[in-house]
Image (cartoon, grey):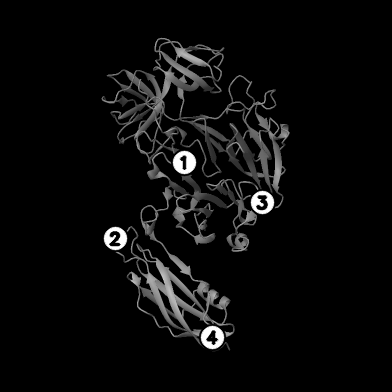
Amino acid sequence: MAVSIDDRAVIKHLVSAGNDEFWFEDIDVAAGTQIELATATGDIDTSDQLTIASTFQKVFVANGANLKVADFINTRLTHSALTTAHARGDIVTQATSAASMIVDHTNTAKTLTYGYTTTGTWDFTNSVTGSGSGTAFTPTGQAGMLTHAALATAHAADDVLTQATSSATMTVTATDATKTHTYGTITAGTWDTTNSVTGSGSGTAFTPTAVSTRPPVWYDWTVEPGGASGAMPAKAYLICVYRGRLVLSGNPRYPHQWFMSKLADPFDWLYGADDPMSAVAGNNADAGQCPDIVRSLISFHDDYLIFGCASTLWILRGDPVAGGSLDNLSDTTGMFGSDSWCFDDARNLYFWGSGGLYEIKSDFSGIRNLTEMVLPDIINDEAADPTTHRITMGYDKKRHGIVVAITVLATGANSNYFYSFKTKGFYPESYPNECGPYSLFYYDANDTTYSDLLVGCKDGYIRKFVTSAKDDDVGGSDDAISSYVTYPITSLSGVDQNGKLSELVFDLAGGASGGDAGDTDGVTYELHKGNDAETVLEAIIDGDTAFTSGTLSGTGRQNKIRPRMRGAYMGLKLYNSTASETWAVNRVLYGTQKAGKVR
C-alpha cells in the first residue's frame, strides 16, 4: 500500500490586529494576502495596548478587559442552552450524519459548543449525544463563511441568506470590509458554488466561489461553565505561552501579579487545585509574584520565562507548580515595554532597558550594554516615554541584525537603529511617519517568498524592507530615501602638524558587465577641515558650509579631484537625497603632503 506523507509539518497563518480589526492569512486561497475576520471587528481596542499569543491552533488576545480567542481549528455548533455542558475532551456524535467532534470549549451561556470535527457533516434536524455527562442536543446552526465577488451592498447582521436550489440558509453575522466574505451561522442545507444566493435586507445577491464550515471563529475567552474552572483575571495586557500554559499579566490593579492556566487547558483557571498540572498564580506558588511592576513576558520554549519589570528583571525556571524558582537577573536594569525585545537565531536575547540596548547570552553568563560605549547618551537623546512611545524590536534573519524602532504613538514620528551583527555597529534610521513601526515580526512563512521581517505601521499597512527599492512606500505615493555616510575624521599629517590634501579619487560601485549588482546612481561629497577632530565632526553635524563639494555620477573610478585643502584634520561626508536613486562607493583614495605646524 502506498503511503503519502505531507512534508509540511506546520501550517502557518499570519495574523494581525489594527484599527480595531483582526486580519488573517487564508493560505488555502492566497498566500501572502490577509482577509478580515469580520466577526472580530470592533471587539478589540487597538488604541489600547494589545498583545497576542498562538498555541493549540488558536490565537489568544490580551487587550485589557477584551480577552478574546481566534480559533483556527474548531467547528462551532449552535444549540439551545444545555442543562449540562459537555466537558473538554468529550466526543459527541450525530449517528444519522456520521458526524463526530472532540469537544474543546463551551461558552458561558452553554449555547455554543466548539470542537474539532473528525468525521461527517452536521445536520440540523437530528440529535447529538456524547461521552461524559453533557446534555444531548440538536444543532440549530454551524459557523460558516461564504466567499464571493465584491458585493455592491453588503448583507447586514441578522439578514437571512437562502440558496433555493440547495435549500441552504445562513443567518449573517458580519461582512468584511472588502465585501468579499460573509460570515454567519448556517442553519439548514449544504451550500454549493454554482447557484445564486439571495437574502432579506438590501444586500446584493451573489454566487459563492467557496464555502467553509470551519472558518476562524471568534469568541470571548472565558472559563468552562459549571463553576469548576475558576476565574480569569478581569484584565490583562500581557500574554505568552510557557510550558503548555497560557500566561497572563499586566492587570492594572495587580501589576506585580502573573497568572497561568492549567497545563494544556487555556479554559481552566482554577488555582490551587491538588494537581501538578493545575492553574497557578504568583500569590499561591512557591515561586511567588514579582516584586516589581511587570512590563513584558518573555518565554523561550519550555526553558525559562523572563519577567521584564519597570526597574528589574526576573527569571522563572521550571514549572511553578512543580518546584520552579523565580530568580533575580538584575536589580538595576528594567525593560521599556511589552515588545521591546527579540531573540536572535543563537538564542541570545536583546532588549531595550534602562540604559539602552542590552544583550543576554543564551547561557545567562551576564547582561551586556551594547550602547554604553558607542552611544553613551542614547537614553537622554531619545527621551522615550512608555506613556507616549512604543519601542519594538525584531531580528532580521536576511540582513543579519536587529531593528530597534522608537515610535511616537500619536504621530508615527520615529527614530530607529539597525544593529549589524557583521560590523557590530549601530546605524540610525528614520522612516516616514506613515511607516512609523508599531510592531516588528519575522514571519517564517510556509511559502518562503513571503518570509521576511514585517513592519506593522502607523497607517495600518504591513511593510517589509526591500533591498532593491529606491524609495519608501507611504501608501498613495513614494518618499525619497535620504542616506549619508561620514568617513572617520582623518589627520592630514602628524601630531600638531598641518597637511595638504592634494588629491582625492572616488571609486563608485558598478560598471562591470553581467552580474546581479546594480550600478550606482549619483553621490554628493562634502569636504570639511579643522584644527581638531571635534571641530570637523561638529561642522558636519551642524551642516556648516563645506570647504568644497561636488556631485559624482557614473560608475567605477572617477576623475581625480585636486582640492588643495590645508588643515590638521579632514572630514568627508557622502550622501544622496534624490528620489528613485541609490548609491554605493567601493573605496576613496587620497594623497596628502606636510604643510607645517598647526597655529
The type of residue carrying mark 3 is Gly
State the image quarter where residue 474 is shown. Answer: bottom left
Residue placed most toward the observer, 505 or 433: 505
Left or right: residue 423 versus residue 316 is: left
The type of residue carrying mark 4 is Asn
Circle nearer the N terminus (3, 4):
3
Q: Residue furthest front?
A: 1
- Give the residue number, with chain letter if any, for mark 1: 16
The type of residue carrying mark 1 is Ser
Relative height, residue 582 to residue 70 (above, below):
below
Relative height, residue 596 to residue 63 (above, below):
below
Residue placed most toward the observer, 165 or 568: 568
Residue 514, numbered label: 2
Of tags 2 and 4, the one toward the viewer is: 2
Instruction: Give the position of the N terminus as an image quadrant.
Output: top left
- Give the residue number, with chain letter if any, for mark 3: 366
Of tags 3 and 1, the one toward the viewer is: 3
- Give the residue number, with chain letter if any, for mark 4: 498
Residue at the (40%, 17%) spot, across then down: 122
Of tags 2 and 3, the one toward the viewer is: 2
Of tags 1 and 2, the one toward the viewer is: 2
The type of residue carrying mark 2 is Gly
Label 2 crowd (10 A; few <14 / some 14-19 / many >=20): few
Tell me the element at label 4: strand
Label 1 crowd (10 A; few <14 / some 14-19 / many >=20): some
